[in-house]
Image: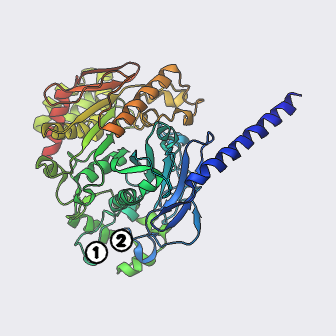
Amino acid sequence: MKTTIGLFSAAFVTLLGIAAFTTVAKEFDPVKIDGGLVSGTFNAAGDIRIFRGIPFAAPPVGNLRWKAPQPVKPWTGVRKCDAFGPSPMQGTPSPFGPWSAEYLIAKEPISEDCLYLNVWTGAKSATEKRPQERLPVLLWIYGGGFGSGGGNVPIYDGEATAQKGVILVSANYRVGPFGFFAHPELTKESGQNASGNYGLMDQIAALRWVKQNIAQFGGDPNNVTIAGQSAGSMSVNCLVASPLAKNLFTKAIAESGASLARPMSTLAQAEESGMKVMQTMGTSSLAELRAKSAAEILQKGQGSVRGPIVDGYVIPQPMAELFRAGHQNKVTLLTGWNEDEGMSFSPPKNAVDYKRQIRQQYGADGETMLVHYPGETDAQAATSQNNLSRDQIFGAQNYGWANLESGQGKKVYVYRFTRKLPATGEYARYGAFHTGEVAYAYDNLKFIDKQLRPLNATDDELARTMSTYWVNFIKTGNPDGKGVPHWPAYSVSDKQIMMLGDKVQAQTLTDAASLDFLFGLMSRK
């Protein structure tokens, strides 16, 4: 009897789902965009329309390899956008360090033909026949060290954010030797005397797509926020710097990553690396290199390409110079970093070896470095090594950016994510790890593997609070609001930041002196 009732209930729910689909489809399906008509799917509740795999540029293959993204080729009929497009060319994903499967792209498809985006929208109308809503829009930019990543990572899912009144768009961009390869021949043929920043140009093309098409999904093209984590956050930093992205967004969320105290390669340096790749490939011309398979390009070119460069076009001058001169795009900024995101996975040095290394590496600055990152005992040295790694790669970068923007009168909000995720086995050692905050900020704890990380009520409440902050900021440019602890704006003078952990509270940044010293030291290098 129980089985019969269960089958009847399942059938009834299915019928309800079909009815909901039929009702909403009349309002949503199809949607006319650049290129043609597209249709999507619904979430289980029937209140969020999801479009996966919308092409926003022509496939960057063949003669379009290493060219700026080109317009899509129009199609006839209605294009079904019900599955993610391929992730960009990269190695096969495999869990490592703290990153279990829900933090990685799907194993397939992976292809050089990768310029697709995804839209989650809860707008009530998206047709030309009825007045449209104008919901705020978020463009999400993934991380992956500029060598990996994609839009189909489970914790990047946009449904929960869309249910809070924000349209979330995630877009693929080229990575590795397909996204950041420079060469004199490419520079010459570009018409801009530049090459190498194709991945950033893909992101800008996605922003232009949003500007031109998001109203058809109920979005406001004049209320767009860009957000990213790790290399995605560095990308956000670059887009704020780039004149090509002017007027395409008004707010920026940068989670653990910037490029203000880390010198980028110049165009000449990147071209030199590109010529070495050509030699490694056994080719003597760009035409021969474009004729090579994507697999061979990936295999032989991956280690030689490291991400964005100062090309004189997308990034017109060194990032720190550009920001200090106030030439960046004007945005409201929310930025921060995580407590335990140092990227060293090898055992820490003991106190004696640690202090010796610091003095050798930093010379006259070594003793001051040891004041800020001391190592009098092995335990203290281990903690300092983790903190120094965190601050060099992330903390000082985002802190320095916050100071530059705030010092120029811009609105800035700064956080520090300190929640040590409950975990079992090997995963217990990673604490508030790099990327750990993403599932909280976008209310996606449902995708976390609970056998590896047995989350609890504290995590649920933190996700509710953080996602409220993020949505408030996307909507209004201020994370503060009803039902959450007060988040004060950051200023260079008082350095008030929001601590996001077991407790959520504002406090003065306690290690500002260390970050000031480190940012200044790194900026001189």
Q: State the CA–CA distance, disc 2 to disc 1.
A: 7 Å
Please tell me which of labels 2 and 1 falls first in the chain: 2
SS for callout 2: loop
Q: Residue drawn 13% across and 51% down?
A: 321
Mark 2 highlights which residue? 67
95 relative position to 373: left or right: right
Q: Where, by quadrant of the figure, is residue 136 drawn?
A: top left
**Residue 358 appears at what percent x and percent y?**
21, 35
**Residue 147 appears at what percent x and percent y?**
40, 55
Amino acid carrying label 1: it is: Ser
75 relative position to 441: left or right: right
**Residue 249 appears at what percent x and percent y?**
30, 50
Residue density around tag 1, few if under 14, some if 14–19, many if 20 or more, within 10 Å: some
Vertically, is 398 above or below 200? above
Numbered label attached to residue 190: 1
Q: Where, by quadrant of the figure, is residue 521 drawn?
A: top left
Q: Can you see residue 469?
A: yes
Q: Where, by quadrant of the figure, is residue 206 drawn?
A: bottom left
Vertically, is 205 above or below 327? below
Amino acid carrying label 2: it is: Lys
Q: Quadrant of the N terminus?
A: top right
Marks 2 & 1, CB-CB < 8 Å contact: yes
